[in-house]
Amino acid sequence: MADELTTLEQLMLTKLRAREASMENDLREFVSIPTGTGYEEGLTRFRALMRERLTALGAEISEIAGDLRPSWVTQPNQRGDITAPVALRAESRAARAGRTPRVLITGHLDTVHDPYGAFQSLSRISSTRATGPGAIDMKGGLVIMLHALEVLQECGVEIAWTVLLNSDEETGSLHSARAIRAEARAHALSGGIGLAMEPSLPDGSLVLERLGSATFRIECLGRAAHAGRDFAHGISAVNALAQRILDAAKLVDLDAGTVINIGPLEGAKTTNIVADSARAWGNARFRDSARDAMVERGLRAMATNAQSPLPHTNIEYEANRPAKPEIPAVRAIATELATIAHVIGEPIGFGKSGGVSDGNLMQAEGLPTLDTLGPRGGNLHRSDEYIELDSMVPRCAMLAIFLTRRTRVDQ
């Protein structure tokens, strides 16, 4: 019965409950490895650890070289010399044998946290809650994934799974997008599904719909001049940029789900020189491809050509995460998970998010993808980021039982 656990499923739940302390220990180890953006020493260590665990499951491991990202994306507070990180790919025996149904499970090793900062370890702050850099986004999800796959193997449940782990999700997956899309496309062609180990919403709800995201840069060029001796001869790129920022703000339409946010700014180096260049980096969010195109048109309309009088405006735009609308196939996956969650005592609901994930890329390639299989927690990207430790076992059981029911190859 769908609303009851089979003997096998009850055995898996029992085994996972016995792993509760082991899950927390793994989480503590994972969190203690600093994997902030571009910190290759920590990312290499974490990648090696994941390789070891996945190899022990009989997976064949490979690395996929990352692509270079556009140079203009680099913001003033970011390094421009970061080597494109590799993506780690692991394929189970059943997947290598061409068995079906197939499932693509994705996750990211990187966090947003400073590898040299004070926030470096997992700390319990109550009987059920702990804080730590990346604890919920998304090292807790990786712990869940590993333990679910390990218990499935212990119980003799064969799944045709592929795990793909990238190291640049927090900066838009520009290095790894091609690899993710290719893998998702291959799984879609075989009738597979996609799961991503991003955290659930704070109340445990699964996200069925996400906005899309784009990165853009507005660059203005003027004419430098001494502010005291020759002010009238100067043409301020900073003033021009300020106007363009206000123009960009007019594209915001909250009712339509369209957001324009300007972040880092770069302008004059001193106050006594009229600035000849200024830049602003921004992020756009949109509900569908039509609104994406509308935002891009609106921003590019600000651009000027080289023959026009100063100040000039140049626009760069990269829609790196397509919108992820709710589709029937994803609703069906979520409904199955909700049924399992109810049986094991972890009721869940459904929700939406303005955030984006690699699930956006996967579903854009035709692969039905649910991307909030991770544990409960909150304060993502903050120095008080936390995970609800008591959600790890039930969320892991939910994943393991779902994989048994939906993707077991010997059914």
Image (tube, rainbow, N blue to C red):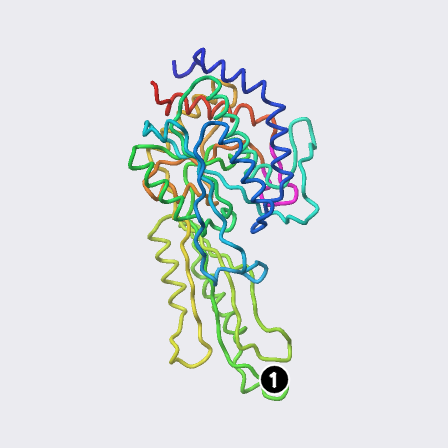
Residue that lies at the very extreme toward the top in this rendered image = 7
Report the front residue among 387 and 34.
Answer: 34
Pinpoint residue 180: horizontal percent, then vertical percent: 40, 44
Q: Residue at x 58, y 35 (%)?
A: 377
To which quarter of the image does residue 364 belong?
top left
Could you tell me residue 365's position as x and y percent? Answer: 33, 43
Looking at the picture, which amino acid does disc 1 mark?
Answer: His
Q: Residue at x 53, y 29 (%)?
A: 144
Q: Percent x, y for residue 142?
A: 53, 34
Q: Main secondary structure of the magenta part?
A: loop
Q: Is residue 385 magenta?
A: yes
The quadrant holding residue 23 is: top right
Give, as a single range, the part of the protein colored magenta: 378-387
Tag count in the figure?
1
Residue that numbered label 1 is attached to: 226
| Relative vertical location of residue 279 with respect to residue 358 in this rendering, above or below | below
Q: Is residue 107 magenta?
A: no
